[in-house]
Image (spheres, grey):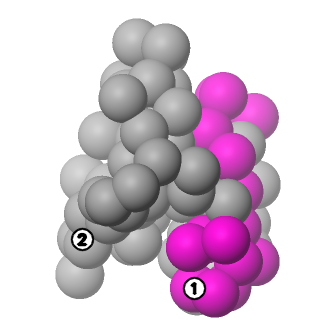
Amino acid sequence: MELGFVGLGRMGRNMVVRLARGKHRVVAWAPSPESVQDVAREGAIGASNLPDLISKLKDRPRAVWTMV
């Protein structure tokens, strides 16, 4: 499964890490670059902004989960 993920607070970060560890392809973005780097170390693909997140999603239709 491939999923875009916006929002890496306490709940969003944990969801992204679990999905990535489960071998899902997760592209993640948050306003905090440190949060993005943190989940990238756990196996997610980091995005620098929303257009970057969309461009890194390969599957169509694209699915993006928002945690705000």
Find residue 20 and report its horizontal and vertical position in percent.
49, 26
Mark 1 = which residue? Answer: 50
Disc 1 and disc 2 in contact, CB within 8 angstroms? no
| Residue drawn at point x = 67 percent, y = 71 percent | 55
Based on the picture, tell me whether residue 50 belongs to the magenta stretch: yes
Q: Name the kind of residue labelled 1 in the image.
A: Leu
Query: How many C-alpha atoms fall within 10 Å of the one at disc 2: few (<14), some, or many (≥20)?
Result: some
Spot occupied by residue 43 in the image (x, y as percentages of width and height): 66, 28
Location of residue 42 by image quarter = top right
Camera-side residue: 41 or 4?
Answer: 4
Q: Is residue 40 left or right of residue 29?
A: right
Q: Nearer the viewer, residue 8 or 63?
A: 63
Residue 51 appears anywhere in the view: yes
Residue appearing at x 24%, y 71% in the figure: 67
Give the secondary structure at mark 2. loop
Q: Nearer the viewer, residue 15 or 53?
A: 53
Q: Which residue is mark 2?
A: 67
User: Which segment did they paint magenta?
Assistant: 41-55
